[in-house]
Image: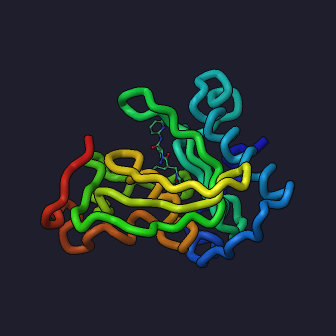
Amino acid sequence: MITMKDIVREGHPALTKVSEEVELPLSTANKDLLQEMIQFLKNSQNEEIAKKYDLRAGVGLAAPQLGINKKLMAIYFQDENGKLYEYGLANPKVVSHSVGKAYLSGGEGCLSVDRHVEGYVPRHARITLRATDMDNNPVSLRLKGYPSIVFQHEVDHLNGIMFYDHINKDNPFEVPENARPIE
Ligand SMILES: O=CN(O)C[C@@H](CC1CCCC1)C(=O)N1NCCC[C@H]1C(=O)Nc1ccccn1
Ligand code: NI
């Protein structure tokens, strides 16, 4: 099972590399890896398991965070309406996005960053993301709000981008123009 010791931290080269696309259809090994990544997220959100294995709760995980530079990412969370987002995706791509920006009003963190980095992380408010899922089906997702932020955070990892790369150095809490806060 994946635990925190498997997650590489800031300074590890895997986090700033552009990862490789994976061959399709997905190999059994890559399918199993996506399954294990989703299971980590589920475990991390289960109070007992997280306590027992000292897991930090996470809603997304990208393969580079395991030191694996493959374009594989996992998502697991429920939005405020209780809609479940459970995905194991290969070769995701943002194919279109809004002009408008959005950011989490509380800023962002990362399981690979063991420090608090303050400031707003401006992202596209809405995106259309295309990828292949764990059953080798093409998926096309139109995302906005919190889900849009989560998926963008993970896709960034596959391109070697960390959340703090988006924070305005001179004024971390500068609200980008036509950007909306997501509580
Ligand atoms: O690349 C992937 N990561 O680095 C895991 C990150 C991904 C999120 C950060 C901002 C958008 C996506 C993650 O999940 N977190 N960041 C660090 C500690 C908190 C944790 C988190 O937000 N947990 C959470 C939130 C709601 C419900 C349950 N748990
Ligand atoms: Ni992260």
Q: Which of the two residues, 93 or 166, is positioned nearer the viewer here? A: 93
Residue 151 in sight here: yes
Q: Which of the two residues, 76 or 25, is positioned nearer the viewer here? A: 25
Q: Residue 102: image x %, image y %? A: 26, 56
Picture quadrant of residue 24: bottom right
In the image, taking residue 79 as reference, residue 66 lies left or right, namely: right
Question: Could you tell me which quadrant the N terminus lies in?
Answer: top right
Q: Residue 153: image x %, image y %? A: 46, 59
Question: Could you tell me which quadrant the C terminus lies in?
Answer: top left
Residue 8 in sight here: no
Q: Residue 140: image x %, image y %? A: 51, 56
Q: Which of the two residues, 182 or 43, is positioned nearer the viewer here? A: 182
Name the residue at the top extreme: 48
Colour basis: rainbow
**Residue drawn at (36%, 30%) of the image:** 80
Q: Is residue 87 above or below residue 7?
A: above
In the image, taking residue 27 as reference, residue 83 lies left or right, namely: left
Name the residue at the left extreme: 177
Q: Is residue 20 above or below residue 172?
A: below
**Residue drawn at (70%, 38%) of the image:** 39
In the image, taking residue 93 as reference, residue 13 lies left or right, namely: right
**Residue drawn at (62%, 66%) of the image:** 91
User: How many labels were placed on the picture?
Assistant: 0
**Residue drawn at (84%, 60%) of the image:** 27
In the image, taking residue 129 as reference, residue 171 lies left or right, namely: left
Q: Residue 156: image x %, image y %? A: 49, 67
